[in-house]
Amino acid sequence: MFLQLLLNGIVLGSGYALISIGHTIIFGLMRVSNFAHGEFYMLGAYFAFTFLDLLGLPFALAFFLTIVCGIILGYLLNRLVFKYVRDDMTVNGLVTIGMSIFFTNLAQYIWGAQPKNLMSPFKSNTIFLGRVSVTPARLFIILASAVSLFAFFCIIKYTKLGKAFRATFQQRDAARLVGIDSERIYSVSTILGTVMACIAGALLGLAYSLEPTMGAKAISVSWAVVVAGGPGNFIGAITIGLLMGIIEALGGGYISSAYKDAFPFIILILVLIFKPQGIFSKGGSRMNG
Amino acid sequence: MNKVIAFLVSLCVVLSLVGCATAPTVAEDTILVGCILPLSGTSAYDGESAMNGAKAAANYINENGGIAGGKKIELIFEDSATDPNTAASAAEKLISYDGVKVLVGAFNSSCTAAVQPVAESNKIPLITAIATSGTLTEKGYKYFFRAVGISNLYIDAFAGKIIDELGIKKIAYIYENGDWGLGSVNTFKEYAELHGAETTTVQVVNKEDADLYTQLTAIKESKPDAVYAVSNLANAVRIAVQKQELGIECPIIGEGSWASGDFLKQAGAAAEGVYGMVEYLPDIKTEMNPLFTELYGAVTNGKAPDKYAACEFNAVLVVANGIDNAIDPDDPTSIRDALKDTDINMLTGPIKFDENGQGYGFEVFLSQNEEGMAVCAGSTTVSLQR
């Protein structure tokens, strides 16, 4: 039972990490308390559904187009909304709560309230490894999450764009002085955050059913992960994401499934009491992940 | 330019405020019935079926001479957003702004419980045909009626029979968190223990849980002969599919959406063999079923009806009959008095109400899914004796 629960937890946790990494960019770095992040995850899943099921495209192409949609969405989001509300967390919090309600209802209007399943390119035959069972789709989620997160890291660490990105969030004014276009960086980071959420939606949609309200749970866990991991801390988001998935699975399995959703928040409370700046943050500086 | 925009915005605000002050004009020959349903939120999909069921009933009544001497019944739908607070405000709005005489709703047991005191204090009859939590009829409300069986009554009718026939010795439970699921599981457990089936584990699913591997792993480890599951559509699909993925082979006995067309379609092979205790099945042989199927098809462009549609259809039939028999069809209390003496034939058979407003006398059905179809595997009449 332990191994099965652990594996379940890793699948859950990979999803949490993917959702949270985008959230930690937008909240931790850009200082936009984005309550609509769960809805971008939901939209990602529905974009994939549109390309895969409604238009019948092959999975790789559908996945690629979902990323393209995420880029467009992120660009528009920064251009039309975040640009104006970036500096005041109360205002952007309220605006994004409104957006969250809007997108949930928009999705219900466009795709309907009926739960949907993504047409999975994987055969649904379960693989049994001893007493542990896993579906190919779930293995793919773990792998693809790891690859996406790795690709994200490479962009941040090794590209010129990534350097400009880090510079802006460490010292905005100094970055401006050396000629970094900070508006462009804000645009890029919103896009990165949105794309990661859309990827999460498209991947997790392979194992879970899609509903317009699916963003609600995602955002609550994502807040816990981002705050516990240290806002703006990528390693923190990934580690805490995985940890919360595993703790949710083990706690739910061994203690009580009625309190399954509470276990991740117990970690959050502990972190807030003992290390309020986040487990992985050193002092108050950003971008040290 | 900015001033023009400012002017237009303030104009809109002023006009919308003015709009609030004027009550809607009601045609002389219509009677308004308010329907509170979850048209958004987690129960939105099932809420839509219910709405279409209600529309089918209203169309049927209006095309057959109307009620109370030729008046038309007009339904006003309000969204509960699957949220008790919103449901209560919707009821306030329907009563004080629209001036409805009767309320139908509010689908979820929790929402219905929130609407009950609003209806009671305004002396407006409230009829539900979907909310099945037992406590709703135990609060002594004088304006509340339930035209559907409660979990206990179904379980009374079927539990012992299923356990004996399947030879179940060990049984696991999984339910959607809430009054309904918990109540249903506890009642079933009583019967199961009485018939010699011991409990292996009880697992809970939250409405927004997408991944149920944790709960199902615990069920798998407990090696039951059967799983009793209480859930609406989305989680029913997840339970069935993920249970199959984990290789748990014992049958599911379900209360909730285990026989609906959408469940069968979405769960696919995982739906096979699942038993359900349901209010309605498309293939039942009641007198009104062919007519209902046709009426519902006309509203939905040929969709097959599900239990939510059937239940809400029943509710509107009962309401219409109450208004029709009321001494003064414009007086809610008079309608309430007429509802107490209800004795009509609904889609699922005859109905009467007891002193708490609980309906009885109609049929409930046991279904089993075979080759993508929910087939009627038995039926029994809801009675009030245990």
Image (spheres, coloured by chain):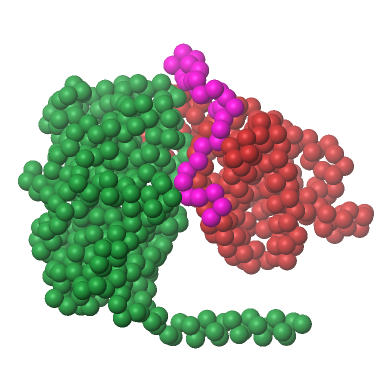
Chain colours: A red, B green
Q: Nearer the viewer, residue A230 or B175?
A: B175
Q: Residue at x 14, y 51 (%)?
A: B350
State the image quarter where residue B221 is shown: top left
How far across and down, in percent of the image, does residue A210 sit? 52, 42
Q: Nearer the viewer, residue B94 or B170?
A: B94
Q: Residue furthest top?
A: A130
State the image quarter where residue B2 is shown: bottom right
Q: Residue furthest front?
A: B64
Indicate whether residue B237 is drawn in magenta.
no
Q: Is residue A157 left or right of residue A256?
A: right
For the N terminus of chain B, the image quarter is: bottom right
Count of marks, rendered view: 0
Q: Residue at x 62, y 56 (%)?
A: A34
Q: Is residue A127 left or right of residue B182?
A: right
Q: Residue furthest right?
A: A178
Answer yes or no: is residue B36 visible.
yes
**Residue segment shown in magenta:** A109-138
How far across and down, in percent of the image, does residue B113 sit? 28, 60
State the image quarter where residue B56 is shown: bottom left
For the C terminus of chain B, the image quarter is: top left
Q: Residue at x 16, y 54 (%)?
A: B345
**Overall secondary structure of the magenta stretch?**
loop
How far across and down, in percent of the image, does residue A110 sit? 56, 52
How far across and down, in percent of the image, does residue A37 sit? 61, 51
Q: Residue at x 19, y 69 (%)?
A: B324
Picture layout, residue A265 above or below residue B344: above
Answer yes or no: is residue A230 visible.
no
Picture layout, residue B5 above or below residue B300: below
